[in-house]
Image (cartoon, rainbow, N blue to C red):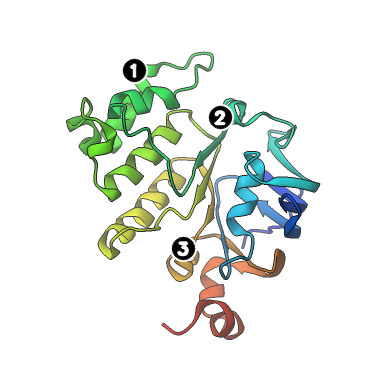
């Protein structure tokens, strides 16, 4: 079992407090994400799940606490990093809505996501993405706005992967998808993780997300309520009864 309290966590949210103006949403949330793991945050509506990610990207306010990235012992203050520079330090993000540029082509969307690291090559990374998502290659010159909901989510994740992220932050990735597409999505997340990308996911489809997760956190009223190995949380009577509901 992954020790979520390890000081060697790749990504750490520490006693985070904040919200929107005078509305306090987060009341001291702590999340640890070990390298190359999948960690999922679940909880009822209004628990503050998405606010954590929005705080990182300055969409929500932070009143106290910290968020850090630990790459090989080098600690980066994530909250002190401007949102447009987060991909440059290895943090990718797929928001729940408005996560593609509909007026641009698929190819142009991917180019927007590219980060020019040393020894990075746009064509090489884009070819790798097209190999992973052949449907995007077929439609490469089409406007992204013509894609279906499932294809849009595929493009949003592909664009985030263009920056070669160390960790991928996902806000409700299954929202609005048909059941069959939800299964495909979670299968794809497992593949992305196995390729070496760490994943921190906020998800309403708690059972499905926790089932593929190494570790999970339950938030309620902006606070940590439960945590544990993902698969075991799905079978925990207390968590099931209060937060997950009947199957």
Q: Position of residue 42 (x, y in %)?
A: 56, 65
Circles 1 and 3: CB distance less than 8 Å?
A: no
**C-alpha separation, residue under disc 1 versus residue under disc 3:** 33 Å
Q: Residue furthest left?
A: 138
Q: Secondary structure at mark 2?
A: helix
Residue in front for this viewpoint, 107 or 26: 26
Disc 1 designates what residue?
123
Answer with left or right where residue 56 lies relative to residue 96: right
Answer with left or right where residue 225 lies relative to residue 239: right
Q: Position of residue 25 (x, y in %)?
A: 70, 59
Disc 3 designates what residue?
209
Residue at 71% in and 49% down? 13
- Give whichever of discs 1 and 2 has the lower sequence position: 2
Instruction: For residue 8, say whether it is visible.
Output: no
- Give whichever of discs 3 and 2 has the lower sequence position: 2
Residue at 57% in and 81% down? 236
Q: Position of residue 187 (x, y in %)?
A: 35, 55
Residue at 40% in and 58% down? 175
The image quadrant where one finds the C terminus is bottom left
Q: Secondary structure at mark 1?
A: helix
The image quadrant where one finds the N terminus is bottom right
Q: Residue furthest right?
A: 64
**C-alpha separation, residue under disc 1 versus residue under disc 2:** 18 Å
Disc 2 designates what residue?
87
Name above or below for residue 206 compared with residue 161. below
Name above or below for residue 153 compared with residue 230. above
Q: Please tell me how crowded label 2 is: few (under 14), some (14-19), or many (20+) other residues with Cα within 10 Å.
A: many
């Amino acid at each position: 079992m992954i020790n979520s309290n390890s000081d060697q966590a790749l990504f750490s949210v520490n006693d985070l407090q904040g919200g929107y103006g005078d509305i306090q949403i987060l009341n001291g949330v702590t999340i640890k994400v070990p390298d190359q793991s999948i960690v999922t945050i679940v909880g009822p509506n209004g628990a503050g799940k998405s606010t954590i990610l929005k705080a990182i990207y300055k969409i929500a306010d932070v009143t106290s606490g910290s968020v850090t990235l630990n790459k090989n012992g080098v600690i980066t203050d994530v909250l002190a990093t401007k949102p447009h520079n987060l991909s440059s330090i290895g943090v990718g993000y797929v928001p729940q809505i408005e996560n593609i540029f509909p007026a641009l082509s698929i190819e142009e969307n991917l180019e927007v996501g590219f980060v020019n690291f040393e020894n990075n090559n746009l064509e090489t990374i884009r070819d790798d993405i097209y190999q992973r998502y052949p449907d995007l290659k077929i439609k490469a010159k089409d406007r992204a706005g013509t894609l279906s909901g499932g294809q849009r989510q595929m493009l949003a994740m592909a664009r985030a992967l263009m920056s070669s992220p160390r960790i991928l932050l996902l806000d409700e990735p299954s929202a609005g998808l048909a059941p069959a597409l939800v299964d495909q999505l979670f299968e794809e997340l497992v593949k992305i993780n196995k390729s070496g990308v760490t994943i921190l996911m906020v998800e309403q489809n708690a059972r499905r997300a926790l089932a593929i997760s190494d570790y999970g956190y339950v938030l309620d009223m902006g606070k940590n309520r439960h945590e544990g190995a993902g698969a075991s949380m799905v079978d925990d009577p207390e968590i099931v009864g209060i937060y997950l509901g009947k199957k």
